[in-house]
Image (cartoon, rainbow, N blue to C red):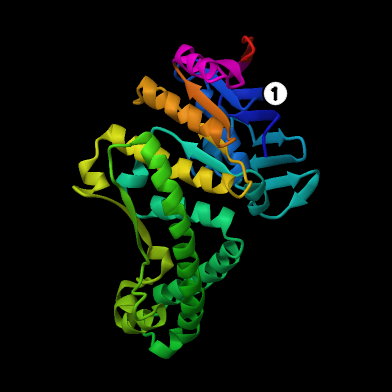
Amino acid sequence: MSISRLHIERVRNIQTAALHQLQPFNVFYGKNGSGKTSILEAIHILATGRSFRTHIPKNYIQLQQSDALIFAQSDQEKMGVQKFITGEQLIKVNGDSIATQGQLARLLPLQLIDPLSTDIIDYGAKPRRQLLDWLMFHVEPDFYHAWQYYARALKQRNTLLKTQRQLKLQDLEPWNQMLAEYGELLHSQRLGVLQQWQVFFQQDLQILLPDLEIKIEYSAGFHPEIGLLQDLQQAHTKDVERRYTEYGPHRADLRFKTPMGDADVVLSRGQKKLLVMALKLSQIAMLHASNKETVVLLDDLTAELDLTAQRRLIERLSQLGSQVFLTTLDHVAVQQHLHDLSISYQLFNVDNGQIHTVAVEPTI
């Protein structure tokens, strides 16, 4: 889905914004605090149901307002979400109310690249699992179903572990069986998708970091050689003591290995940022190969990237058919890249929550 029209109400300092005739690249510039990133945040809320800056709706809903509204339209679809300060939400696709965010997420595959993206490499397994599972959701049709069943069983098992002190193995056996069944299925699905992803990753790594050798290593979160059921049974006593489930796909991880050691240790901050971009671009390329186009939110493009890296990134996103919404303090440099690459774009100036369309010369 490519967004042709975007409407935002009551998101941070944006009271009302109506953007029309959006292009493959849409560039927002202005001073710090002007509201540039809030535009990207609104698109992220629409596509995923959550902000990438806060988990609490009242933090992005305008002060003294009860709700925020985001609406987008393409040639084929209309979608909107209304988020209330109470945490409730109303989602509509083509005028029909829907119960879950999943339908929007499938219509609008979204990738975010921002200054905090290096957290994927530096901090904990959760963001790396989320990176893998975003790809799983969009390319493996049965993943979401399997994950829902697994998550439900995991929640029940952990509730028993937290609330009952004297649990015998047989008390957990129904949940062990269910976790093992769906956990093994998730693991198998992840292995298959990861094998495909590695090919696309190496291609984009050569574009952004041609002098580095990096491989993705996957840890299942349990011991596949003996199976998840046996892990759960053998860890019973420790799980009861710790009061949570130690083994399973919810503990899986990705590590990025170089010949010199782990990427989080040996790479510079600039190299880490390019590595994250290679990871996300390769996911976009994998969807593109399946005729699925991705909307990309690119926050603060010119920060920490030299002109060569900026141009490589813009050119690659254009090759992949992505629609890009990007923010920058240096719109002149971005415009030069887009002009030189003959990419159609729209320019917007953002000033204290007001968004103004800036006329640009058409690209040839």
Query: Horizontal placement of 322 versus 190: left or right?
Result: right
Q: Nearer the viewer, residue 64 or 330?
A: 330
State which quadrant residue 95 falls in: top right
The residue lying at 67 percent from left, 35 percent from top is: 2
Q: Does residue 336 sit above or below 177 in this rendering?
A: above
- Asked if one can make out residue 85 in the rendered structure from this viewpoint, the answer is no
Q: Which residue is mark 1?
A: 18
The residue lying at 57 percent from left, 66 percent from top is: 148
- Asked if one can make out residue 344 in the rendered structure from this viewpoint, the answer is yes
| Farthest-out residue, left | 260
Q: Position of residue 312 (x, y in %)?
A: 43, 28
The residue lying at 71 percent from left, 40 percent from top is: 80
Q: Position of residue 73 (x, y in %)?
A: 73, 34
Q: Amino acid at mark 1?
A: Ala
Q: Does residue 148 sit above or below 134 in this rendering?
A: below
Residue 344: within the magenta? yes
Q: Nearer the viewer, residue 84 or 75?
A: 75
> How many marks on residues?
1
Residue 44: within the magenta? no
State which quadrant residue 93 falls in: top right
Q: Position of residue 77 (x, y in %)?
A: 76, 40
Q: Which residues are magenta?
A: 330-355
Q: Quadrant of the C terminus?
A: top right
